[in-house]
Image (spheres, grey):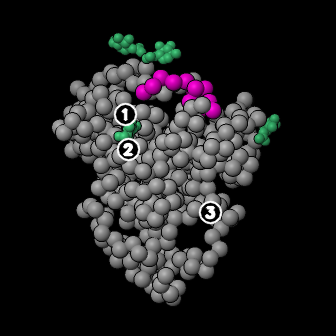
Amino acid sequence: MASPRIVPFVFLLLIVGCSARALYPLPSRRNDRNRQSLQTFRAYNIAHRGSNGEIPEETAAAYMRAIEEGADFIETDILASKDGVLICFHDVNLDDTTDIADHKEFHDRKRTYEVQGDNITGYFTVDFTLDELKTLRVKQRYSFRDQQYNGKFSIITFEEFISIALDAPRVVGIYPEIKNPVLINQHVKWSDGKKFEDKFVETLKKYGYGGSYLSKQWLKQPAFIQSFAPTSLTYISNMTDLPKIFLIDDTAIPTQDTNQSFWEITSDNYLDYIRDYVVGIGPWKDTLVTASNNYLQTPTDLVARAHARNLQVHPYTFRNENQFLHFNFSADPYNEFNYWINKIGVDGLFTDFTGSLHQYQEWTSPFSSGEDDAYKFLDKIVAMISKFKHT
Ligand SMILES: *[C@@H]1O[C@H](CO)[C@@H](O)[C@H](O)[C@H]1NC(C)=O
Ligand SMILES: *[C@@H]1O[C@H](CO)[C@@H](O)[C@H](O)[C@H]1NC(C)=O
Ligand SMILES: *[C@@H]1O[C@H](CO)[C@@H](O)[C@H](O)[C@H]1NC(C)=O
Ligand SMILES: *[C@@H]1O[C@H](CO)[C@@H](O)[C@H](O)[C@H]1NC(C)=O
């Protein structure tokens, strides 16, 4: 290990050098030998769609903000364009979070497709080329969140997302989801006969992602692969040893690929089966501790049964606003973090407000090494320099 006196100055030069260079082209050529490593001693702070509580979801700006705010992992949903490019976008259609309605040139693209048993009408990503998608601008999903960034940012590709993580001034993991694989494989055909899942794993490998959980390779470029579709997870299990997380939807929603009920996929038998393929589960938090009249009920035993099988539990989604906080938490998101981290004992949290979770964790279980103090000092210097540059 380099002497602690030298590390900060090399680190500072890297940050300053980096802030001046363009985000693209790919891939990142950053020298990352001296980057602060991923913390693994406390629950993971997973920036759900970036810091989308503040900035429109899945945009470069939302991800960069999440990195500034202390995310351990930046999370994204991978879909595909008509011409087979993997993109970061949550909904199968563009209607709710882009300005597609203002683009008259695309109005003949409206379609109705069956998605997970429901007919959905709208403008689907799979009917637009990447070039066409790039002409759209993303907007905030919720009306009660900051609208000032609407129309400012475009949809990004999976590769652009990866470059943001690789360019971060410390090790930041990625947490991409194989999103709606049934629909994507129905509508998008790749010329080499490959499937969506093949393209997904190929992209990760292209940028050096690989290695089992906590292996040396993994710690350099950490990644969790997530999916609601068990067949996608088992299909890729022979292609990459990266850790995988099995997402679990609400109790009424069957799996999109195997049509299995919530009760079946959370049974002891099923957990025994899936643990050969995944390192953890990602359930909706209200299925772990159900609520009635917005008050929490007795926790279910799912977390205990998962932990008994050495499966991590990363529930979703933690959101600061009152309309998402159960009354037990007295309208205080820190109370909610405290409950899930210290009472339920989860291993990671998907949050729309990475900054809040980070501050809560720094307050309750901070890094304590001298090296970290040096990084905090450097952060201050870097902040001062960047202020100076902007005035
Ligand atoms: C969706 O629409 C098609 C065509 O109209 C119809 O055959 C199918 O039953 C519908 N599916 C659902 C789930 O409503
Ligand atoms: C992985 O490969 C082995 C050996 O080729 C095969 O038996 C197994 O069925 C494969 N698993 C999956 C999920 O494709
Ligand atoms: C899924 O399973 C449910 C319950 O067993 C069944 O009623 C339904 O027809 C199945 N759907 C499909 C598409 O197989
Ligand atoms: C939440 O509040 C309800 C109503 O007071 C109470 O019954 C329940 O035990 C509380 N749950 C937790 C986890 O504090």
Query: What residue sits 34% from the left and 77% below the top?
Result: 17
Say whether marks 2 and 1 touch (CB < 8 Å): no
Residue 185: x and y, percent? 30, 31
Query: What residue sits 57% from the left and 55% below the top?
Result: 44
In the current view of this chain or complex, which residue is farthest to the left? 191
Q: Element at badge 3? A: loop
Q: CA distance from mark 3 to mark 2?
A: 29 Å
Q: Quadrant of residue 294?
A: top right
Residue 381: x and y, percent? 49, 80
Please tell me which of labels 3 and 2 falls first in the chain: 3
**Which residue is at the front of the view, 111 or 244?**
244
Q: CA distance from mark 1 to mark 3?
A: 33 Å
Please tell me which of labels 1 and 3 falls first in the chain: 3
Provide the residue designation for mark 2: 238
Q: CA distance from mark 2 to mark 1?
A: 18 Å
Give the class, few, some or many, for how many residues have Cα within 10 Å of label 1's Cα (few <14, many ≥20). many
What mark, if any, has residue 41 been given in the picture?
3
**Which residue is at the front of the view, 242 or 327?**
242
* Residue type of the residue flagged with mark 2: Asn
